[in-house]
């Protein structure tokens, strides 16, 4: 009796990524791409997934909303693109929802680099978050600040969907403690024009300032605020690159800045997945430094690869989406992600790190 025919594996598994490789978020975008690339390169070196190699295609959006939509549309117009991976920006990805592009394309977006609540509530089936949300990060900050008796908290935020999402998280965390921000000061998106925000916050006696900002404006705020003698404890949510903060603001000013993190500490190989990441970074990107952003996207790529394996040979967008949805309590090697039919938030882990006296993050 003849055996049933098996489906031939796909020749290539195409994964599309739109990332900010230029503009104010360029260094972050480069780290994002690197984290995915080392994972996909390692999988390909081991023979691929069901014999098919992963092709990782990357387009630059410069952190511009219109460019994100244009580039994503061009990827989804190609049937061979199975999924989207590692896009950045709350406002950028929100536009993909508002335009209906994700729904029309029917492809999953895995591990976006954002914690915006608008991408999580109301529930949508297309976006599979690896990280905790900005609301989770704000709650963790306020819990820590409340524990040490800090009550006067100001907020510096980017005036767009990203900044407003973070601001909403801080407001909610303070409201649960029957408080409100001492001050709220914004700066324009895609600039580092923070002088007005510095002056508005500096005029008040804040004990702590939470920055909902990306690298360059966060660094500009830190530098100017400290130069004017500001002594409040500075906090940042997880999307900043501490190395760039130190480079742009100066170590004297950046020393002591606290940054929330949403994935495990990648600088010491205490967990299996951290050891794996560090080894692959050396093998596939010699000279590249360990970085929270590349590690986060490595974890996202590892999650996507597991879903590709479970989807079987010749996966489709729909089959891959169902495979992701079925990843429940999946251990990446010391960090667990879990999805389900009504859950697209893989993890709610949050911890705080601090820029130490040598410019490196410590816990």
Image: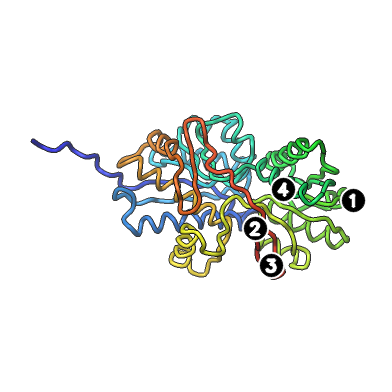
The colour scheme applied to this rendered structure is: rainbow
- Label 3: element kind: loop
Check the picture and name the quadrant holding the C terminus: bottom right
The quarter of the rendered structure image containing the N terminus is top left
Residue 125: x, y in percent?
50, 32
- Name the residue that disc number 3 marks: 359
Q: Nearer the viewer, mark 1 or mark 2?
A: 1
Cα distance between the residues tagged 1 and 4: 19 Å
Q: Earlier in the sequence, mark 1 or mark 4?
A: 4
N-term mark: 4 or 3: 4
User: Earlier along the polypeptide chain: callout 2 or callout 4?
Assistant: 4
Sequence-first tag of 1 and 2: 1
Q: Residues within 10 Å of mark 2 (few under 14, many from 20)?
A: many
Where residue 203 sits: x, y (%)? 91, 50
Question: What residue sits right under mark 4 in the picture?
Answer: 141
> Label 2 belongs to which residue?
241
x then y, percent, for residue 6? 21, 40
- Name the residue carrying label 1: 205
- Residue 206 spot, x, y in % from top left: 86, 50
* Element marked by disc 4: helix
Nearer mark to the viewer, of 4 and 3: 4
Is 75 positioned to the left or the right of 211 in the image?
left
Q: CA distance from mark 2 to mark 4?
A: 18 Å
Pick the front one: 148 or 358: 148
| In this view, the mark in front (2 or 4) | 4
Residue at the spot x=34%, y=48% of the render? 12
Tell me the quarter of the picture where residue 348 sits: top right
Q: What distance separates the C-alpha of mark 1 from that of mark 2?
A: 27 Å
Structural distance between the alpha carbons of marks 4 and 3 = 21 Å
């Amino acid at each position: 009796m003849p055996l049933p025919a098996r489906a031939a594996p796909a020749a290539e598994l195409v994964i599309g990524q739109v990332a900010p490789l230029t503009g104010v978020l360029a260094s972050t975008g480069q780290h994002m791409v690197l984290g995915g690339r080392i994972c996909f390169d390692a999988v390909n070196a081991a023979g691929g997934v069901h014999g098919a190699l992963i092709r990782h295609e990357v387009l630059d959006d410069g952190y511009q909303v219109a460019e994100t939509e244009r580039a994503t549309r061009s990827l989804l117009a190609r049937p061979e693109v199975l999924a989207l991976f590692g896009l950045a920006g709350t406002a950028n990805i929100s536009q993909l929802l508002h335009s209906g592009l994700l729904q029309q394309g029917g492809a999953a977006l895995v591990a976006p680099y954002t914690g915006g609540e608008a991408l999580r509530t109301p529930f949508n089936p297309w976006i599979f978050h690896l990280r905790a949300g900005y609301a989770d990060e704000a709650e963790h900050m306020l819990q820590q600040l409340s524990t040490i008796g800090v009550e006067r908290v100001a907020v510096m935020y980017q005036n767009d969907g990203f900044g407003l999402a973070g601001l909403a998280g801080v407001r909610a965390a303070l409201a649960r403690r029957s408080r409100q921000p001492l001050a709220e000061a914004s700066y324009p998106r895609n600039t580092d024009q923070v002088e007005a925000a510095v002056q508005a916050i500096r005029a008040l006696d804040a004990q702590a300032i939470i920055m909902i900002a990306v690298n360059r404006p966060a660094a500009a705020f830190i530098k100017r605020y400290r130069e004017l003698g500001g002594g409040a404890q500075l906090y940042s949510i997880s999307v900043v690159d501490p190395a760039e903060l130190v480079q742009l603001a100066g170590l004297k000013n950046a020393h002591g800045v606290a940054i929330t993190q949403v994935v495990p500490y990648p600088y010491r190989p205490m967990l299996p997945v951290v050891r794996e990441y560090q080894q692959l970074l050396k093998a596939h990107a010699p000279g590249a430094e360990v970085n929270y952003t590349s590690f986060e996207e490595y974890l996202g790529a590892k999650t996507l690869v597991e879903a590709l394996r479970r989807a079987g040979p010749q996966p489709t967008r729909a089959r891959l989406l169902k495979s992701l949805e079925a990843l429940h309590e999946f251990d990446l090697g010391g960090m667990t992600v879990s999805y389900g039919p009504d859950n697209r938030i893989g993890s709610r882990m949050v911890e705080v790190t601090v820029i130490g006296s040598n410019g490196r993050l410590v816990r």
